[in-house]
Image: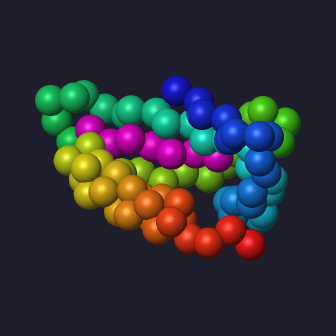
Amino acid sequence: MIIMFKNKRVVSYLGRNGTGKQTGIEILPIGDPSSNQVVTLSPVNSNGNIANCMIDIPVNDIPDVVRQLNKIYKAAANAPAH
């Protein structure tokens, strides 16, 4: 699954080959769901390609990651606009 950032937002990633422009993220489940499955997150670069960079998250830890991301999102949504 690929999620492109809203409003054509461009951020940076740091991968094996240095920094690059990131326009989205690939979310890819790896492994057998009955075993030690992980989800791999990789940046989508400004050319629409998957960049040489990845973060593995054990499936069992996804709820904790989502909970922390939601806390960050809610804090940002409540922050005063500049």
Tell me: residue 47, above or below residue 15. above
Quadrant location of residue 33? top left
Image location (x, y in percent) of residue 64: 26, 57
Left or right of residue 25: residue 8: right
Is residue 19 visible from the viewing direction of this image?
yes
Bounds of the magenta span?
37-45
Is residue 58 visible from the viewing direction of this image?
no
Query: Magenta stretch containing residue 54, yes or no?
Result: no
Query: Magenta stretch containing residue 41, yes or no?
Result: yes
**What residue is shown at x 38% (from left), y 41% (from top)?**
39
**What residue is shown at x 80% (from left), y 56% (from top)?**
20
Q: How is the image coloured?
A: rainbow
Left or right of residue 79: residue 50: right
Camera-nearest residue between 73 and 46: 73
Dominant secondary structure (helix, strand or loop) of the stretch shown in magenta: strand
**What residue is shown at x 46% (from left), y 68% (from top)?**
75
Left or right of residue 8: residue 78: left
Image location (x, y in percent) of residue 61: 25, 53
Q: Quadrant of the C terminus?
A: bottom right
Tell me: residue 35, above or below residue 14. above
